[in-house]
Image (cartoon, rainbow, N blue to C red):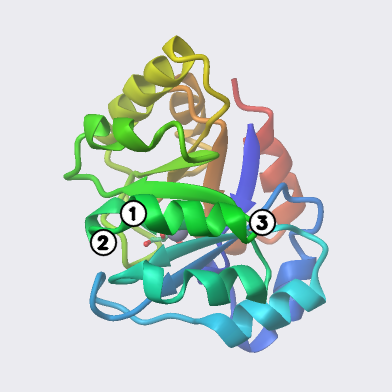
Amino acid sequence: MKIAPSILGCDFARLKEETDSVAGSDYLHVDVMDGMFVPNISIGIPVVESLSRATDIPLDVHLMITKPERYAERFVKAGASILTIHIEATDKAHECLKQIKALGAVPAISIKPGTPAQAAFEYLDEVGMVLVMTVEPGFGGQKLIPECLDKAAVLKEQICRRGLDVMIEADGGITPENIALVRRSGVDMAVVGSAVFNAKDRRSVIEQLRRAD
Ligand code: DX5
Ligand code: ZN
């Protein structure tokens, strides 16, 4: 299981130390919120730029913003390795994914808890990853909604049936207590915010999460 610590759970005044404390993670998950698509505002392009200079961990940037096509290019140029857009946030998802790929990043889509897995099917040929939200996007520290994991299993089955190479990521409420359930649903990469950053020994929590099966 790949693990992507979410910096939404960290102390932003100490971003460099916090990032270093999770060195060796597969990706660093960066939540971008615009106060429109979700009822919260987090961070944006300058922080992604600084982070990409400050760490070797590849950046997994999760755009929770309306009309992501307006900013996709700037986020890739700022250093996103994976750039995820929500299909609920745009009617130009296909064009936007093409653009992300052409710029050299891995294009990815995300679905909120209320969006059926089937809504993602038409994008599977164009993405390198599907992010299944396991909480309502907007805030860290919420409880995982187990029904969302059923959608991960449906997507995994569809990806295998079509012989595609697409990762499934789950995001929200993931802890050492429920990671086995997440893994069994076919999830390849888990985003973990509070369970990592609230822990004293972050690396050992990451190792514990990684070993889930
Ligand atoms: C929520 C964000 C998540 C969040 C996860 O909108 O997309 O990435 O940081 O945090 P935890 O693990 O605390 O639910
Ligand atoms: Zn996220």
The residues bearing labels 2 and 3 have C-alpha atoms spaced at a distance of 21 Å
187, above or below 81, in the image = above
The residues bearing labels 3 and 1 have C-alpha atoms spaced at a distance of 17 Å
Q: Which residue is mark 3?
A: 104
Amino acid on which disc 2 is placed: Thr
Tell which circle, 3 or 1, labels the residue nearer the N-terminal end: 1
Q: Secondary structure beneath disc 1?
A: helix
Q: Secondary structure beneath disc 3?
A: loop
Residue found at x 61% / y 87% = 46
The residues bearing labels 2 and 1 have C-alpha atoms spaced at a distance of 6 Å
Residue 90 is marked as 2
- Is there CB contact under 8 Å for labels 2 and 1? yes
> Which residue is nearer to you in this view: 34 or 98?
98
Residue 16 is marked as none
Q: Quadrant of residue 134?
A: top left
| Number of numbered callouts drawn | 3
Most extreme residue toward the top, as rendered? Answer: 161
Residue 152, x across and y down, in percent: 37, 29
Tell which circle, 2 or 3, labels the residue nearer the N-terminal end: 2
Q: Is mark 2 within 8 Å of ligand 2?
A: no
Crowding at dot 2, Cα within 10 Å, few <14 / some 14-19 / many 20+, comes out as: some
Residue 210, x across and y down, in percent: 67, 34
Amino acid on which disc 1 is placed: Ala
Amino acid on which disc 3 is placed: Gly
Residue 93 is marked as 1
